[in-house]
Amino acid sequence: GAVVSQHPSRVICKSGTSVKIECRSLDFQATTMFWYRQFPKQSLMLMATSNEGSKATYEQGVEKDKFLINHASLTLSTLTVTSAHPEDSSFYICSARDLVSGDTDTQYFGPGTRLTVL
Amino acid sequence: GQNIDQPTEMTATEGAIVQINCTYQTSGFNGLFWYQQHAGEAPTFLSYNVLDGLEEKGRFSSFLSRSKGYSYLLLKELQMKDSASYLCAAMDSNYQLIWGAGTKLIIKP
């Protein structure tokens, strides 16, 4: 089945630093990847939709200058949290759609990255 | 390895009851989540089980058996709006989520 990986799985950083999170589709190509933020036992909150070769589409209330998204290839999207602060501490999850399958409803989710900002 | 299995698709009738099963194998276990996802929308949290047993929340109930690596989501009094994908995700010892591929539930009148 389709596999999505994220790296790192866990990161602890100091306030004011930037953190990059990678999302990769391992065995399929994905023109579209999604970045979510999850708080404990709550729904996934969509932050942005990342399209290969074009600018990401951000959801209302998400600062695009703070959460930089780059989708440079059909298998890789990155989320950079710039000048991280403690309130950015969260579980970040990405998902990807399989280009070839044509199933536009199915998303394959990554295992998540737990960010802790001190 | 770690994996999680759930049926690809299920069909049920409005007003009926449906049970969506999920089996998992993980390195350690820190709970199991169920999400509902309508097409084009973000997954909505339905339940979290970490102890054995049944948890009921309105029309939805979730069951967990840790010894069997098994969970199910039970939906009662089905409504047309329950047509969606239902995602099962287990959290391993590193607090990473292992996701099922989702079960597409089709409700017929």
Image: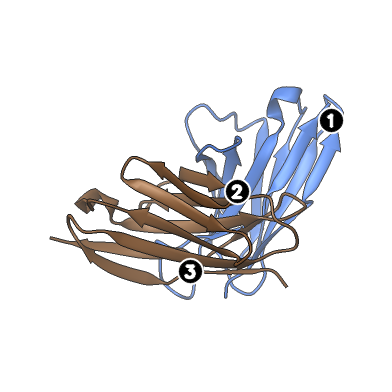
Residue lying farthest to the left in this orientation: B109
Is B78 in front, or is B41? B78
Task: Give SS at disc 1.
Answer: loop
Say which quadrant the N terminus of chain A sits in: bottom right
The amino acid on which the numbered mark 1 sits, given as a three-letter code, is: Thr
Chain letter for mark 2:
B
Foreground: disc 1 or disc 3: 3
Chain letter for mark 3:
B
Residue B100 percent across, percent down from the top left: 54, 64
Task: Give the residue number, with chain letter if any, for mark 1.
Answer: A17
Contact, mark 2 vs mark 3 (Cβ under 8 Å): no
Q: Which residue is drawn at 40% across and 63% down?
A: B20
Task: Give the residue number, with chain letter if any, for mark 2.
Answer: B51
The amino acid on which the numbered mark 2 sits, given as a three-letter code, is: Leu
Neighbours of disc 3 within 10 Å: few (<14), some (14-19), many (20+): many
**Residue A52, located in which quarter of the rendered image?**
bottom right
The tint of chain A in the picture is blue
Contact, mark 1 vs mark 3 (Cβ under 8 Å): no
Is A34 in front, or is A111? A111
Residue B6 disc label: 3
| Residue A19 seen in this snapshot | yes
Foreground: disc 2 or disc 1: 2
Name the side, left or right, on which B38 lies relative to A57: left
Q: Which residue is drawn at 75% across and 24% down?
A: A86
Say which quadrant the C terminus of chain A sits in: top right
Tell if the residue under mark 2 belongs to the same chain as the one under mark 1: no
| Residue A53 seen in this snapshot | no
